[in-house]
Amino acid sequence: MKTKLIILHNNDTHGALKPVPTSTYETLGGYARRATFIRQERAKHEYLLLLDAGDIYQGSRYWHKFKGVPDIKLMNMLNYDAVALGNHDADGGIEILAKRLHEANYPVLCANVTFPDNHILGKAWHSHIIKNINDFRIAIFGLLIKSRELYPTDFRSVIQITIINEIIQNLIPKLRKEADMLILLSHLGHLGDMAIAQATDNIDLIIGGHSHTTLNEILWVNDTPIVRATSGSKRMGRLEIILEKDKPPTLTDYQLIDMDSSWHDAPDITAEIKKWDSMLPPSEVLGQLHDALDSRSEIKAGGESRAANFFTNALTTYFGSKIDIAFVHTGTLRGDRIFSPGDFTNYDLIEFYPFNMPPTFMEITAPQLKIMLERGVSALLHPVGIFLSYTGLKITADISRQPQILNPARNSVITHGQRIIQAEHRGQSIDFEDEQLTFKVAMDDYIGRGGAGYFITKHGKNIQHLDVCMGDILEWYLKKHSPIKIDIEGKIKIISPTNKRE
């Protein structure tokens, strides 16, 4: 007996209740279009699973006002079968997360990050579920990126983390015995998904999230298929799988489907969103953009971008001669869309930079700078959020050379990177071996506290977490210097295997 199973999946919606602009200034995404697509698929197929790989609500105008309430309501209206816990789902702290999970009518999955049983979040999610599909048992488990610095203080001080090797050795074999198909609903990110696929061949399908790394086709690693849709849920993934008893599942078709205007808006979803729109605070124009800001991952995290230059130019302008270099890791730049030239509003700002943490100031040596720069290009060609951008430097990186390799557990470098082959500051070549050469630098708070593998910043001198928040600096920059003209200056040159001269 054969059974055709349809799996629909999305990830990293980040509060995008309505469609967002694309490079052609068309729009993609939105719950109302998504609802129409899902309901049509359900009407056509008897056996269907609807899954979300986490980070549902944080990052939009709705989050700042309503803290995820409308997002959970909309997810309930779409009847999700399971949702992975995402790191940004915890951004509001323990109390808000507990409330949102209590409101959810679907199981939230996370096997490797837990709380004590007597805690308010002690039994708030499940390690896994098993769904019965026409007498086939489908096991679905969730995994969450474990980096403690990603979470609020009240969250990270209590969480219990199970290392992935224990999951591989214990939970996965257990589920393998109980189920006909094993699905990982992952919020580990692109590199984490590849790592777990390489470490075990016992997972039938990995559906990913976190890193905003779209996979336009199936990525096969160790005979394990990995899929990942587009952040903002601008596109939905659709898989067709054939199930047969005593045979491994067969993946027969995969598509990423644009949530464009060809999907009409579901009236009930549209009405629900309008209700929340009516309660938002008024829009305020903060300034104007001369150039579009493209904060999509494939643009901002693969080389120099106007989005990153906007951020670091604002820092440099605000602090002036007090700093030599301004840094931003591109994972902190959000929206994952194009902000059009013209008026830039308070809503645009909180969707471009939703965290509003204070920047960090410190002094670092030339050798420490080298470690930071190597970290920034270590994942290329993969466009992930650790990519580092800056104002005040000009570098050349050859990514065919040895990348930096870290031991995250020990906050140490296992293998020093050799990719940064040239760097200049104010026209002068930098000697990375000169420990007496120092730079005054400012950066986004997350890497300033050692996050994203930038642990070297913990060893800077005269570290100051400043009183003014970065969102306020960006607002000041817009109000004082509009229209904001942002150039691509050629300050980050990437030599890749495809463009390297022999």
Image: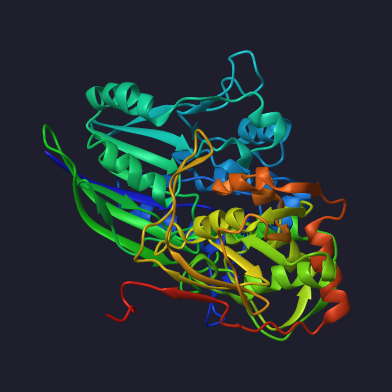
In the image: residue 359, left or right of residue 91 = right
Residue at 59 percent of width and 25 percent of height: 159
Percent x, y of residue 413: 48, 44
Residue at 57 percent of width and 81 percent of height: 25
In the image: residue 130, left or right of residue 81 = left
Seen in the picture, residue 105 relative to 77 is either above or below; the reply is above
Query: In this view of the protein, which residue sits in the foreground, 484 or 186?
Result: 484
Residue at 68 percent of width and 72 percent of height: 392
Residue 333 is at least partly visible in this image: no
Query: In this view of the protein, which residue sits in the foreground, 436 or 392?
Result: 436
Percent x, y of residue 325: 70, 66
In the image: residue 47, left or right of residue 26 = left
Residue at 69 percent of width and 44 percent of height: 69
Percent x, y of residue 200: 26, 35
- Name the image quarter holding the N terminus: top left
Q: Please count the marks in the image.
A: 0
In the image: residue 455, left or right of residue 218 = right
Colour convention of the picture: rainbow
Percent x, y of residue 311: 71, 68
Residue 64 is at least partly visible in this image: yes
Seen in the picture, residue 184 relative to 389 is either above or below; the reply is above
Location of residue 395 by image quarter: bottom right
- Name the image quarter holding the C terminus: bottom left
Query: In this view of the protein, which residue sits in the foreground, 316 or 333?
Result: 316
> Residue lying furthest top in this view?
118
Location of residue 16 by image quarter: bottom right
